[in-house]
Image (cartoon, helix red, strand yellow):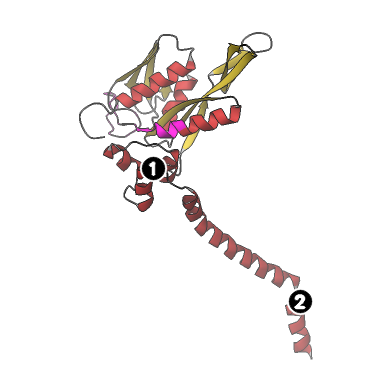
Amino acid sequence: MIMAKDKEIVEENPIVEEAAAEEEVAEVKEEIMVKRPVRERRAWLPRTKLGNKVLKGEYTTLEDVLRSGELILEGGIVDYLVPDLMEEIIYIGGSPGKGGGTRRTATKRTARMHKSGRRFKLTALVVVGNGTGFIGIGKASSREHRIALEKASEQAKINVVRVRRGCGSWECGCGGEHSIPFKAEGKYGSVYVKLIPAPKGVGMVANETTKKILALSGIKDIWVKTQGQTSTRQNLAYAVFDALKNLNTTKGEL
């Protein structure tokens, strides 16, 4: 009788039941974690020939796509090949702040005059990168703030390029990829940007807008020299992107 009572007590013990329930939940979580990446990849439906090739496995990395010269026409390709892609919003807009000055905003508002009145448009600028050598920039406009940011992010993924990194400073010569291999120049509008390789430990000697772009490209040490109307952040961002893109125009492998 005592053994039977003990058995009943063990079966009705809430601690044992709770432990068994936790084990079942843990098993379910493990199954979900294993299946989640597959579901994310199946959610993307390619709409171009390049997208179908990527989904079939003909291109396994984004670098293979860029080397082949294929034209990327949908952002889903970049999301599929670079799952750790990050994005930064460049604050190109502004509004008068309290007590003077300018309060930066994520979108720039412009107006056109019509018979019915003013029609406003919002423009956004977004930069994407994975911090290990890929960078892209995109600009888009819409009547809504959220849609403008989403369109700009999609455009940035389409314009992604490979950044050539290295150690081109005579003061370092470590052979790593913390800087750029040689000087590079870029221009957009009235803004002129010159990138100069720096030794390890210097950091990014640049303003905040340029630092955002260089950090996403994977560069840690660099000197930046600018000329022109650099307060126009849109032109400054495109000039920096042009300089990074020009690193790939020289002879030699990427």
- Image quadrant occupied by the C terminus: top left
Q: Residue at x 29, y 29 (%)?
A: 167
Quarter of image, res 180:
top left
Residue 128 visible in the picture: no
- In this image, 3 relative to 59: left or right? right
Q: Residue at x 23, y 26 (%)?
A: 250
**Structural distance between the alpha carbons of marks 2 and 1:** 60 Å
Please name the amino acid that badge 1 sits on.
Answer: Thr
Which residue does the numbered mark 2 point to in the structure image?
A: 12
Classify 10 Å Cα crowding around label 1: few (below 14), some (14-19), many (20 and above).
few
Secondary structure category for the residue under label 2: loop
Residue 48, numbered label: 1
Q: Which residues are magenta?
A: 155-179
Secondary structure category for the residue under label 1: loop
Mark 2 / mark 1, whichever is N-terminal: 2
Please name the amino acid that badge 2 sits on.
Answer: Glu
Q: Main secondary structure of the magenta part?
A: loop
Q: Residue at x 57, y 20 (%)?
A: 121
Residue 244 place in picture, x, y as percent: 35, 25
Q: How many marks?
A: 2
In the rendered image, the vertical position of residue 228 relative to residue 179, given as above or below: above
Residue 210 painted magenta: no
Closer to viewer: mark 2 or mark 1: 1
Residue 173 place in picture, x, y as percent: 27, 29
Residue 189 place in picture, x, y as percent: 40, 12
The front one of 77 and 60 is 77
Residue 159 place in picture, x, y as percent: 39, 31
Residue 173 painted magenta: yes
The front one of 91 and 147 is 147
